[in-house]
Amino acid sequence: MQENIQNNDSNIDFLFTNDGSVGLYNYDVDDIYHSVFGAKSEAKDKFVTPLNFENNFFYKNELNILDICYGIGYNTKTFIEKILQTNYKGKVNIDLLETDKNLVFFSPFIKDGFFKNNPEISYIILRSLFDEIKAVDFALSDIIENKKVKKFFEPFYRRLIKRFKFDRYTYDHERCKQAFLHNIYYHCISSSMKIAHKCLKYKDFEITPYIGDARQSIKALSKLYDIVFLDAFTPAKQPLLWTLDFFSELYRITQKDCMILTYSNSASVRHAMKESGFFVGKLLDKQNRHCGTCASKNPEFIKNKLDEYDTGLMNTSAGVYYIDKSLNSSCEDILKEHKERKQKLNLESSSHFIKRYKNMRECRQYEKI
């Protein structure tokens, strides 16, 4: 079931995915934000579980996370859930890159599948984003109460925002903020989270949104990131954040022991990662099927290395990466240049390679008999 919502920045559909969490469809791009099989499940399987957090990151006293194309926040929320489950005691800084500020502001209030068992996740995000949300004068309350889309938002937050809209003028900003957060903590968290150190733990998260073109935002970043979630639209439709030049920027701002994770299995994406200097591997689901790609400067972080088939595809026409040297080209210009370069290179097609590889494997099997 989809319902449409329009704002100044985008033309979005809300829909329920198969695991009950809310997903999005963007008409401007003609692409989905999340798998219809489950937005929450996808974030866990493709972005958080493959981190092998306990072995690779738990020892660090401070973590810097970069969530590219934050949307309504499933990757960040699932990561926060993981942190709370492991009782990690360090500081966590999460930077969000997103073009649509309304999606960022919607994110704490969405029916995302976390509220029932982990309401503290929205609380943590709201602690950091409250000032930005307040700055838009809570105009999102009109959208959240829209009859067509209000079913996609948690009823508790709808009631709280509605009350806040009429009561906020009786408080100064800081008292208003404390009252709003206190209501969430008292009604959603305190009954199940009475341990003092849990309350203090929520203050160890700092979440900062950067609204605008991620290519421009990333050029201004100077800290070194431990973990990067790259959840942009499909490369063939929106190549802006999948270029060699963008991955080169990611290389500049990542730690030696870093991990970049994405849902994409694209040979061109893997080729761009490799040419940028990263070691590249593949993500496998529970059925041992390809479900994404990971990259790191540390080869020991790559659990499932690319095999002969994967590297072979990278050397075909399908593996020709996108280029955006100025990091401000349009999609149309990037796609045009990519098409022209592919024609000049005249590489083997992916379909021909797949047939050749299949025949080669059959010959090898025959020789073993």
Image (cartoon, helix red, strand yellow):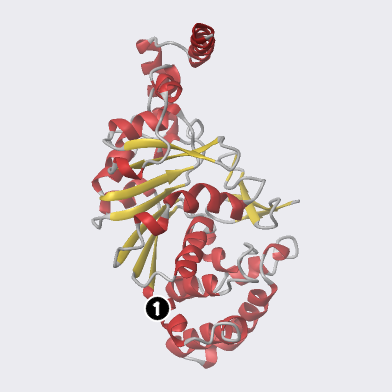
* Residue at the image point whose x is 61% and y is 78% from the top: 161
Q: Please tell me which residue lies in front, 198 or 230.
A: 198
| Image coords of residue 204 (percent x, y) | 37, 75
Circle 1 sits in a helix, a strand or a loop, which is it?
helix
Residue reaching furthest to the bottom:
170
Is residue 343 placed above or below 2 in the rendered structure? above
Going by the image, does 314 lie left or right of 278? right
Is residue 304 or residue 216 the one in the foreground? 304
Task: Tell me the amino acid under the disc marked 1.
Answer: Lys
Name of the residue lying farthest toward the front: 369
Q: Quadrant of residue 87?
A: bottom left
Name the spot of residue 32 as percent of width and height, x first: 60, 43
**Residue 133 visible somewhere in the drawing:** no
> On the rendered image, what quadrant is the C terminus found in?
top right
The number of numbered badges drawn on the structure is 1
Task: Indicate left or right for 160 with 277 as reference.
Answer: right
- Within-10-Å neighbours for mark 1: few <14, some 14–19, many 20+: few
Q: Return the residue nearer the eye: 369 or 193.
A: 369
Q: Indicate left or right for 16 with 81 as reference.
A: right
Rendering quarter of residue 180: bottom right
Q: Position of residue 15 (x, y in %)?
A: 69, 52
The residue labelled by disc 1 is: 203
Q: Is residue 154 left or right of residue 365?
A: right
Q: Position of residue 343 (x, y in %)?
A: 40, 12
Res. 279 visible in picture: yes
Vertical placement of residue 356 versus 39, above or below:
above
Image position of 244 with respect to 309: above or below: below
